[in-house]
Amino acid sequence: MSQQNYKIENMLGLGLLIAAAIWYFGGSGRDAGIEETASSKTAAPAETWQAEYSTCVRDLTCWASKWQAAAGRNCGVPIERLAKLNFKWTNRTFEPRLPRATWLNKDTGTLTYIGDGIEFQNGFGAWIIHTYECDYDPLSARVIAVRARTGQM
């Protein structure tokens, strides 16, 4: 195979990959679904939304999963600051940093998220696995407190 044919095949392959990514992430069918979902939410009566909210806020699994991504974003830096020297996250790319949750205060809807996907470096250069907790108020998107201890969950 000549060098020119190899370059042409690579360019065609790259072009197909880019076209597939554009179709997948920006296709017109996906936009229509988003608009439809948004308009159906605004058309729903306030009573329906309040009923769903009051049901979810009483169920730990529903409430914790609803705010898990926001808690992961907001708790990340405060957890990293617990490291005396250096840190490294050991979670996989699409794995949540805070996979478990418990109630901090059920009446206020505050949660404690828990994970063990971080290692802190000690003074000798060794990496030590830590379990961390983040007390989180989802309604104000506020980190209340963070803690870490050596070991896994």
Image (cartoon, grey):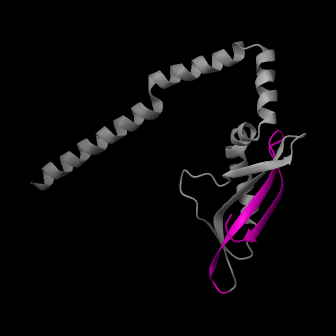
* 150 and 3: which is toward the camera: 150
- What is the magenta segment's predominant secondary structure? strand
Residue drawn at point x = 40 percent, y = 31 percent? 23
- Quarter residue 13 falls in: top left
Residue 153, compared with residue 50, is above or below; it is: below
Picture coordinates of residue 33 (x, y %)? Answer: 53, 21
Q: Residue at x 75, y 38 (%)?
A: 63
What is the quadrant of the N terminus in the image?
A: bottom left
The quadrant in which residue 92 appears is: bottom right
Q: Position of residue 68 (x, y in %)?
A: 69, 45
Residue sitting at the far left: 1
Extreme residue in the bottom direction: 124
Is residue 82 something that shows in the picture?
A: no
Q: Residue at x 69, y 69 (%)?
A: 130
| Camera-nearest residue between 129 and 34 | 129
User: On screen, 64 above or below 24?
Assistant: below
Is residue 135 rendered magenta in the image? yes
103 horizontally vs 16: left or right: right
How far across and down, in percent of the image, does residue 42 sit?
A: 71, 16
The residue sitting at 73% across, 43% down in the picture is 64
**For the C terminus, which image quadrant?**
bottom right
Q: Is-magenta flag for residue 22?
A: no
Question: Is residue 64 something that shows in the picture?
Answer: yes
Region rendered in magenta: 124-153
Point out residue 48 in the picture as x, y percentages from the top left corner. Answer: 77, 17
Q: How many marks?
A: 0
